[in-house]
Amino acid sequence: MPAIAVDAMGGQHAPEAVVQGVAGISLQTDIECVLVGDAPRLQQILEGIAYNPEHIDLVHAGEVIALDEEPNEAVQRKRDASLLAAMRLVSSDRCAAMVTAGNTGAAIAGGRREFALIPGVRTAALASVYPRAADHPGQDPLALLLDVGATVRCEPADLVQFGVMGAAYAQVISKVEAPRVALLNMGHDPAQGGALSQAHQQLGSLTGLNFVGNIEGNELTSGRADVVVCEGLLGNIVLRLLEAVAGMAVDLTASAAQRNWRWRAGMAIMATGTERLSALADYASYGGAPILGFEHLIIKAHRRSTAQSITNAVKVAAKAVRDGAVARVAGAIGSAAPAPARRRSRR
């Protein structure tokens, strides 16, 4: 299998955590990775840790797009940035997919510049995985939410395509034959939500898509839907709120336990539950989620990714490549009802 390109300079803990994560992959699996970034610095980090040199290559890139830079300006100005250099390795077919924990907006803008959209796709969608309760044995504990920021305001046809792409990706990654797709809305009534009612009607009319209707915010963490579709603005707010609430719950529990022996005793009794709560708050541990719609695969890891997070993200990318995620998405789009083009991706 072709290698996975990894943006070694992207993320709050880069490049050390990224290099350590890729080094771990090299020892655990036969996945080949290309680390893209400041090659002398990357080599220096590698020399201080255990790794398999047969599974790691280095490609030098002299610039870095910082997490707080304006994405479009940075993509235009920093052509030798590690993020863009990694994308070019993929577009040239040296690598099969790429992983980055860097600037999310730049990853989306860079994808629009370096990659073509899958034929028929109107606009790319940034997905995110988030924890939810399982309502049956074997159900994936993570659901897929899209869009979470690539397209702030969406037309009904965009939301329909997000549902089609998300379901196809979930089939590959979660191994669900017919993922349940839901539309995030203010109620279950199909007529609610203005333009969302059009998306509801169109999603429900697609043959082959397991559309279960609208889902409300309080149902997001249930097992009702495997894929949840919404506009980028709403999706981003939901994702940040889930992160904040989970983190706050963990902090409050820990703080109370320090002050009161009864809380400590209770936490000991509920050890499994508190461990699960901590796991829900640790979004950086989930690896990464895709930017869907391009002819090449981008896995976006959390900006706070640790070495283990990078390891998980690379594994997700390799699994998606091995099982043909992009081809599955393209096939699903091709078989869905055609929608007029919204915008073209620039090469």
Image: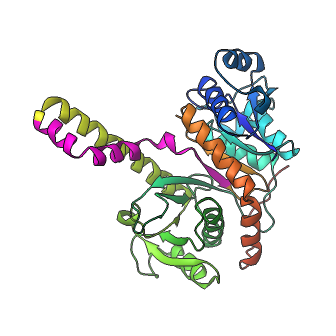
Q: Is residue 75 left or right of residue 141?
A: right
Residue visible at 77% across and 63% down? 327
Q: Is residue 282 left or right of residue 21?
A: left
Can you give x and y, in whole percent of width and height, for residue 135 in the image? 39, 68
Residue 103 falls in which quadrant of the image? top right
Q: Is residue 61 above or below residue 118?
A: above
Q: How is the image coloured?
A: rainbow
Residue visible at 54% across and 74% down? 195
Query: Is residue 267 within the magenta segment?
Result: yes
Residue 100 seen = yes
Residue visible at 61% across and 78% down? 209
Q: Which residues are magenta?
A: 262-291
Can you give x and y, in whole percent of width and height, for residue 77 in the image? 77, 31
Residue 303 seen = no
Q: Nearer the viewer, residue 118 or 254?
A: 254
Can you give x and y, in whole percent of width and height, for residue 229 in the image? 54, 65
Labels in figure, total: 0
Query: Is residue 20 within the magenta segment?
Result: no
The prevailing secondary structure element of the residues shown in magenta is: helix
Residue visible at 51% across and 66% down? 226
Q: Is residue 245 above or below residue 82?
A: below
Q: Is residue 7 left or right of residue 137?
A: right
Can you give x and y, in whole percent of width and height, for residue 291 in the image? 66, 52
